[in-house]
Each structure stands twice: as C-alpha cells, then as structure tokens.
C-alpha cells in the first residue's frame, strides 16, 4: 500500500531555514530517508507552501493512499481546512513535527490537525518521520 507523506509551508527550506531548530539536512535528504524507512511500502513524498494544494493532496490520498504522515508546518496552528480534509480520509494519520513545538512559543502549542491525528510526534528531528513510518507499517 502507498503512504502519502505531506509537508507544509517553508519545509522546502529545510537545511537552510533556522538550522538550530530544524537541522542541516535538506528536504531531499528527508525524502531519501523516508523512502528507505517505508520499504517495502511505496511513498508519495510532497511539499507545498499553499494550503489549498495540501487540501487537494489529502483528497487524492482518499483515492490512493493507505495512510498519511503529515507535517503541516505552520498550517498546524491555523488550518481548519486541512483538518476538515483529513476528517474525510479514512486511514491512519500521523502528525509529525521536527521541533518540540510544546517547548516553543505558545501559538505552536495548539494543533488543529491533532483533533484528527491518530498519533503525534514532536521533537525527534527527522527521526520523527522514520518513527511515524515504522508505526504506520504495523497498521496497514
Ligand atoms: C514544524 C513546527 C511548526 O510550528 C512550524 O510552523 C513549522 C515546522 C516542525 O516541523 O517542527 O514550520 O511543523
């Protein structure tokens, strides 16, 4: 079964943006790591800075994915639209944050996506994606 890995705004700058928070690895390093961790399952690894694009990809996941691993980035804290889209998806959803959001500014402590997510991982760096994929593999 196919697993969708969705990444929200600014994650294209991984490795360049606030490396003290998000580390030095790039989005393509992360993609390679995920592809490896997911085996034998196939992944569709996507990133967009546009909320509507993330919503459209979640709709596509309804048709083709067994599970979703999502780092909604800033949309975590703002987007009822992403939450509503995830509520229309039937499979497991795991929410991942590279940083430990609860140790950071108060506005990062609330997540709309957590109202739907079956699991939430924060603060494990890129390893959070690997942990999410290992878990998802036990479910699908
Ligand atoms: C993030 C945490 C969010 O608060 C932030 O807006 C991001 C990345 C993380 O992976 O730690 O862009 O989701």
Image (cartoon, grey):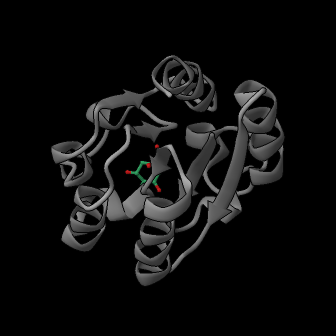
Residue drawn where x is 77% and y is 27% of the image? 39
Rendered location of residue 33, percent (x, y)? 78, 33
Q: Looking at the rendering, which quadrant does residue 92 occupy?
A: top left
Q: Looking at the rendering, which quadrant does residue 129 occupy?
A: top right
Using the image, determine if residue 120 lies above or below residue 106: above
Rendered location of residue 107, percent (x, y)? 20, 53
Report whether residue 35 is seen.
yes
Residue drawn where x is 47% and y is 36% of the image? 99
Q: Nearer the viewer, residue 38 or 122?
A: 38
Please give left or right for residue 16 compared with residue 7 in the image: right
Q: Looking at the rendering, which quadrant does residue 78 occupy?
A: bottom left
Report whether residue 109 is seen.
no
Residue drawn where x is 28% and y is 32% of the image? 118
Rendered location of residue 67, percent (x, y)? 48, 42
Please give left or right for residue 38 compared with residue 68 in the image: right
Using the image, determine if residue 18 lies above or below residue 62: above
Residue drawn where x is 58% and y is 28% of the image? 133
Q: Nearer the viewer, residue 61 or 111?
A: 61
Figure disc tally: 0
> Could you tell me which quadrant the N terminus lies in?
top right
Please give left or right for residue 67 compared with residue 22 in the image: left
Q: Nearer the viewer, residue 115 or 92?
A: 92
């Amino acid at each position: 079964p196919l697993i969708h890995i969705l990444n929200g705004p600014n994650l294209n700058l991984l490795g360049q943006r606030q490396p003290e928070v998000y580390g030095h690895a790039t989005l393509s390093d992360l993609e390679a790591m995920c592809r490896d961790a997911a085996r034998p399952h196939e992944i569709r690894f996507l990133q967009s800075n546009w909320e509507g694009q993330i919503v459209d990809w979640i709709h596509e996941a309804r048709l083709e994915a067994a599970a979703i691993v999502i780092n909604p980035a800033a949309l975590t804290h703002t987007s009822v639209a992403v939450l509503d889209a995830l509520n229309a998806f039937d499979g497991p959803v795991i929410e991942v944050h590279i940083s430990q959001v609860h140790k950071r500014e108060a506005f990062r402590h609330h997540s709309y996506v957590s109202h739907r997510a079956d699991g939430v991982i924060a603060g494990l760096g890129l390893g959070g994606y690997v942990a999410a994929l290992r878990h998802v593999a036990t479910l699908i």
